Image (cartoon, helix red, strand yellow):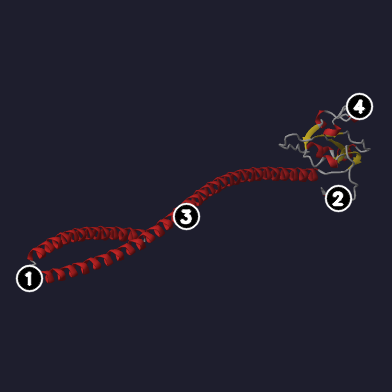
Amino acid sequence: MTPALRGGIPPPRASSPRVVSVTRGQARHLPTIHLRTSTPPRYRFEVQRPVQCAAASSACMTPRRVRILNNEDASADSFQTPPKESRKPATDAQFTTLLPNSLPAATSHGQYATLTVEELLNLKSELVAAQDAWQAAGAQQHEAEASIAQLKDELSGMKACLEQVQEYRNQDQASMVELKQELVTMKVASQSLQRELEDGAGCRAALAALLDQREQELLNLKSELVAAQDAWQAAGAQQHEAEASIAQLKDELSGMKASLEQVQEYRNQDQASMVELKQELVTMK
């Protein structure tokens, strides 16, 4: 608000024209203000004829009336040609100016205010500053929209990364489940091999006991053979019987040797099996 409007003048009513008093010389220098808005309200200054004074020299200093009309006042009644007595020559022709959306509230029917050219220039400066601020706000809005678009793109990328990470996590969890199942299977196989090793150790102990028994039998047979030979030397009459017994013993000895060879073969097989079991146990560990 200009200083003239702060001097106790009541606020204008809505939808009424505003009259500004300027001199004849000031009216020639009134500025024309244009704003680059999409649909700005239109204001028209109507310069009326000055009041005739007694002295001709004072006529140029008599204030003139300027009516400011907005879009709401742009009806047929508001823009009618002024009365004949208020028409001006070509030098006092009417002029038009564009003002921002904040001025319609200041223009009202039946309310008049007095503004000087300096105040109008100040008003123009304020309007230019408001326009610059509006343009700066528009640029900031474009920058904010660009930043928001960039943030949306980054958010979309982060969502895609999170989805990919979740997918990798699901795959890792599935792999962990498979590894746990394989570990359980390996534990079962290890326990089975341990039982087989224990069974093999028992079989080996039984075979060792059998070998000891066979060796004892062989020693006994050898002792019997020695006794038989002594008896054969002592008793020639019993030579045939001794030879028969010897032959029989030889046959039994051959059978026992075959049995011993078979037992030895079984022992070798058991030792090979034990070696394989030990290797498998080392591999499992």
Q: Amino acid at mark 4?
A: Lys
Near-viewer residue (170 or 10): 170
Circle 3 Cα neighbour tier, 10 Å, few/some/many (<14 / 14–19 / ≥20): few
- CA separation in Å, label 1 and label 4: 187 Å
Query: Which of the marked residues, 2 or 1, is nearer the chain's N terminus?
Result: 2
Query: Which of the marked residues, 2 or 4, is nearer the chain's N terminus?
Result: 2
Dot 4 lies on which element?
Answer: helix
- CA separation in Å, label 2 and label 4: 34 Å
Q: Comparing marks 2 and 3, which lies closer to the viewer? A: 3
- CA separation in Å, label 2 and label 3: 86 Å
Query: Which of the marked residues, 1 or 4, is nearer the chain's N terminus?
Result: 4
Q: Comparing marks 1 and 3, which lies closer to the viewer? A: 1
Whole-percent x and y of residue 174?
Answer: 50, 49
> Label 4, on which residue?
84
Dot 3 lies on which element?
Answer: helix
Query: Which of the marked residues, 1 or 3, is nearer the chain's N terminus?
Result: 3
Q: Amino acid at mark 1?
A: Ala
Q: Amino acid at mark 3?
A: Lys
> Label 2, on which residue?
6
Q: Amino acid at mark 2?
A: Arg
Q: Comparing marks 2 and 1, which lies closer to the viewer? A: 1
